[in-house]
Amino acid sequence: MDAGNQQRILGYFIEEAKEHLDTLEKGLLDLRTVVQDPERVNEMFRAAHSVKGGAAMLGFASIQKTAHRLEDSFKILKENTIKVDQKLETLFLQGYDTLKDLIEQLQGPFGLREEDAQKKMQAAEPEFAKLQEYLNRLVSGTSAAPASDRQKPESLPANFAPQVTEILRQMLQLFKQADTPASRQQLQTMCKRLVQLGAGIKPWQGLIQVSYKAIANPKNAYPALAPIVIKELKVASDKLQHGKASELKPSPELQKLATAPAATVSAPAPTATPAKEKEKPAAAPQATSTTPKQITLPLEPKAAAKVLVKAFDKPQLVQLVKLLAQATRSPS
């Protein structure tokens, strides 16, 4: 097979895999409802199975094995009546994150390097083992915590869970759209709604406030924000419903996004003009017409790669890779 056809087939696989990831993500964010619908569980099973088959055909062993582990876990959900709890949701989301990370690296400008894939698989294997073990315990009915370990849930609205799930779904859809001031404002409004749902619960409100600050910072690109914010709010919601409000706290990753300094370089806009320049007469209109478009990049390499993939088309990415390769070979 020539390189052109191989690249085209790889592109088809990545696009199809991203659709399957979307199916898995939506299902896992609403797993307690999904398990009551056999067809939706089967849909998730088929999604994992399809990713596994495509990866096997193209020789991506790490993606194949990860999708296979998820497929086996969904099979248990298909064949048994299981009461989903916060721990099971968290374990499933961790497995999903591994699969998503591998596919995103494959799509990135440098591809999926074998050593990186092996490291990620080694790190994920203990979590998959925990998922399998916990599913087996749920099937056998031995997962219930002792009465003395159970905590009384905080006072929450009767419809707290479905409202939070719906808001997170809406936020996820916004994160997948273009990054605009209007969409950021919508995301911040949704954070305010989440605060209202947990009125009086300080750990919950504190976590939402940190998420709000992270979203408000235009330096943080949506691909970097989405996986951290959505996952942390989902896990926090589940813990809150199980009376574990004391365990709610933002992760170091979320805190870093919330405290990142504002971008100093951005696309030309009135708000980006220094105060002293605002006092000067307006420049001639043609000065802005030739200004090249600019983007801001997070300092974390993986997040930066996601922004670049989203911002550039394939020929531009190829050119960028060549320039970066030349830069790394040049003496400093």
Image: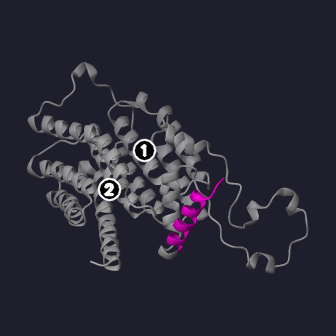
Point 58% across, 66% down: residue: 323
In the image, residue 187 sits, relative to residue 310, either above or below, namely: above
**SS at mark 1 in the image:** helix
Q: Residues within 10 Å of mark 1 (few under 14, many from 20)?
A: many
Which residue is more in the foreground, 163 or 50? 50
Nearest to N terminus: mark 1 or mark 2: 2
The x, y position of residue 110, in whole percent, is 44, 61
- CA gap, disc 1 to disc 2? 14 Å
Residue extent of the magenta highlight = 316-332
Whether residue 209 can be seen here: no
Name the dominant secondary structure of the magenta segment: helix
Magenta stretch contains residue 323: yes
Tag 1: amino acid: Leu
Tag 2: amino acid: Glu
Whether residue 103 can be seen here: yes
Which residue is more in the foreground, 177 or 244? 177
Which residue is more in the foreground, 150 or 11? 11
Residue position marked by numbered label 2 in the rendering: 25
Residue at the right extreme, as displayed:
280
The x, y position of residue 235, in whole percent, is 37, 41
Q: Is the residue under label 2 in contact with that under label 1 (CB below 8 Å)? A: no
Q: Is residue 272 left or right of residue 74?
A: right
Q: Is residue 268 left or right of residue 31?
A: right
Q: Is residue 218 left or right of residue 305?
A: right
Q: What is the number of the mark on residue 291?
A: none
Point 33% across, 62% down: residue: 22
The x, y position of residue 136, in whole percent, is 13, 38
Residue at the top extreme, as displayed:
148
Residue position marked by numbered label 1 in the rendering: 233
